[in-house]
Image: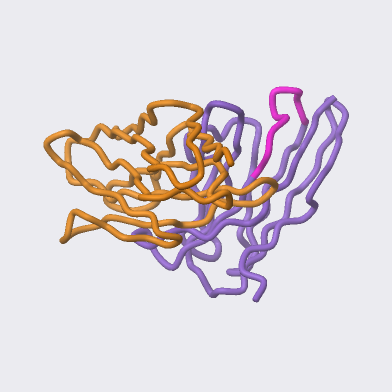
Chain colours: A purple, B orange
Amino acid sequence: NAGVTQTPKFRVLKTGQSMTLLCAQDMNHEYMYWYRQDPGMGLRLIHYSVGEGTTAKGEVPDGYNVSRLKKQNFLLGLESAAPSQTSVYFCASSYSGYQPQHFGDGTRLSIL
Amino acid sequence: AQSVTQLGSHVSVSEGALVLLRCNYSSSVPPYLFWYVQYPNQGLQLLLKYTTGATLVKGINGFEAEFKKSETSFHLTKPSAHMSDAAEYFCAVSINNNNDMRFGAGTRLTVKP
């Protein structure tokens, strides 16, 4: 029972490099989310999607882009990585806007 | 806009003692309230949620929380702490739907033998 799977689990980038984080869910959820977690700040919503082909900005969207080409996948892209984007990134999904979210185990990203 | 405040970034209790983790929210309309737990190197897991109805909500692992509208609080309690309860706990609030769920900064619970 995989649930929400994030790849990769760890990554180190140099400033200016680009990369894509992949989130896959096998629960047929409509809603998917990307958060970043920083010490003492809880989780902050980056972008989210309410269905295949849709995306929307969250609380801290600058420097990130997302795509939801397939219902089960939600991609988070960093076009030009900056040290301020060093964080732990979590993907989550839910059936609807009123249901609890299911989280992946996170991607630990360091930007040097 | 709604917001969440968790009082105390670190709480330490002895095994068998009462656990009390505090959460206050601000919202002009009735919120949906959640408590999540995060173990090291893992994602968040739902402990319990309040939507409507009974204000005392029971969750997994013996935890419960009470929604007090007059105090705008949703404190998490457990009568007797276990070593396995050591983790970080997050309170979250959502209005209308989860598109705008806001998380507190988290409280790290330590359980001493």
Q: Quadrant of residue B73?
A: top left
Q: Is residue B39 left or right of residue B93?
A: right
Front in this rendered view, residue A94 or B104: B104
Q: Is residue B104 above or below residue B97?
A: above
Residue at figure coordinates x 65%, y 31% from the top left: A63
Instruction: Write the start and end of the magenta stretch as one range.
Output: A81-89
Q: Position of residue A18 (x, y in %)?
A: 81, 38
Q: Position of residue B87 (x, y in %)?
A: 57, 44
Q: Position of residue B15 (x, y in %)?
A: 51, 44
Residue A77: in magenta span: no
Front in this rendered view, residue A101 or A15: A101
Residue A86: in magenta span: yes
Residue at figure coordinates x 53%, y 58% from the top left: A32
* Residue found at the far left of this picture: B70
Q: Is residue B93 left or right of residue A102?
A: left
Q: Quadrant of the C terminus of chain A?
A: top right
Q: Quadrant of the N terminus of chain A?
A: bottom right
Could you tell me how many numbered marks the image carries?
0
Front in this rendered view, residue B14 or B92: B14
Q: Is residue B83 above or below residue A24?
A: above
Q: Is residue B3 left or right of residue B72?
A: right
Front in this rendered view, residue A111 or B15: B15
Q: Quadrant of residue A15?
A: top right
Q: Position of residue A8 (x, y in %)?
A: 80, 52
